[in-house]
Image (cartoon, rainbow, N blue to C red):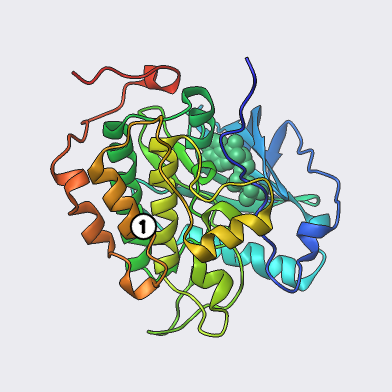
Amino acid sequence: PKRVQPETEKAPVPSSPPLSRQNVKVQPPSPPQIITDATKAMQFRRVGFLGEGGFARVYEVEDARSLRYACKVVTKSSLKTKKAKTKLYAEIKIHRSLEHPNIVQFGDCFEDDENVYMTLELCQSGSLMDMLRRRKRFTEPEARFFVVQLVGACQYMHDHQVIHRDLKLGNIFLDSNMNVKVGDFGLAALIESPGERKKTICGTPNYIAPEVLFDTANGHSFEVDTWSIGVILYTLVVGRPPFQTKDVKTIYKRIRDNQYEFPSDKEVSLEARELIQEILTPDPQQRPSLFDIIDHAFFTQGTVPAYIPSSARDTVPDFR
Ligand code: ADP
């Protein structure tokens, strides 16, 4: 059968001015079999490869007690500029300050001569993006289960003045019990004074809120994460993102014009359509709060499964 690409999760759009670490091709890290810090206090055995992102490689590692983690490795050669270093330190500072059952737990951070290492909670079931590729789309009870946990994580981040700014299926990981773990704080921002607005254009094309692209004078804030939650909910129940097209320019045009529709060949409940439509409100001030989202009929009138069976990684679960 023809392979369909459910969604483009291209590398996040670069902030302006462009960052060297996103534009310069650097040798990917090749960490040693035994990863250790200078003092040898920390020792991990590399046991597998999990994936790679824009500038990092992620390995599965095991400590002396046989506990498994994910280990994100960044080569120091990709951190030559002050800006690249500042970005990585910001990611580490924000991520390590967070502790929530639905956020990938930050473990340790250390370095050797070649690389910087970050150990993270291992998410055995991959990302929601991987799962969508296999499943094509999700049932509404599953979408409720994932989005309730995502909103919980988001509420916690916002309470701690953190905007994630890159919420998307590829950054929502699942542990062995199919619980949501939000990860990748590479574009996260800390709001340091009430009312502060962020001006950096960043995110991933399909998920970017209109104010990030088109209200650069005013800037953006927490509501950009709410917008992404709307895009995620649509993508879960429809199988592809709402503003998806071949080229990024057209995606932005559609976001600007709030132009998306529900395909006629896929059944999506009225409640789901209504909630998605409310969340995808162009004016960030008019967008529902995270509490409003969870209080919507889509959640209050529908079933939220107590758990998702791991068989759901590949096949539709039967909740009856
Ligand atoms: P980048 O910030 O460079 O995009 P990511 O943090 O997105 O890097 O990680 C790249 C890939 O590594 C992910 O797509 C995923 O496959 C894998 N990965 C990242 N974190 C974890 C984790 N905690 N558990 C399991 N796999 C992970």
- In the image, 95 versus 136, the foreground residue is 136
Q: Please report the residue visible at 45 percent of the width from the left and 55 percent of the height from the top.
A: 228
Q: Which quadrant of the figure shows ligand 1?
A: top right
Q: Horizontal placement of 285 versus 96: left or right?
A: left
- In the image, 65 versus 109, the foreground residue is 109
Q: Quadrant of the C terminus?
A: top left
| Vertical order, 137 against 258 (above or below) | above
Instruction: Kindly identify which residue carries mark 1.
Output: 154
Q: Horizontal placement of 258 versus 271: left or right?
A: right
Q: Secondary structure at mark 1?
A: helix
Q: Residue furthest top?
A: 1
Q: Please report the residue visible at 45 percent of the width from the left and 80 percent of the height from the top.
A: 192
Q: Quadrant of the N terminus?
A: top right
Q: Is residue 122 visible?
A: no
x, y percent for residue 37: 68, 48
Q: Please report the residue visible at 65 percent of the width from the left and 35 percent of the height from the top.
A: 51
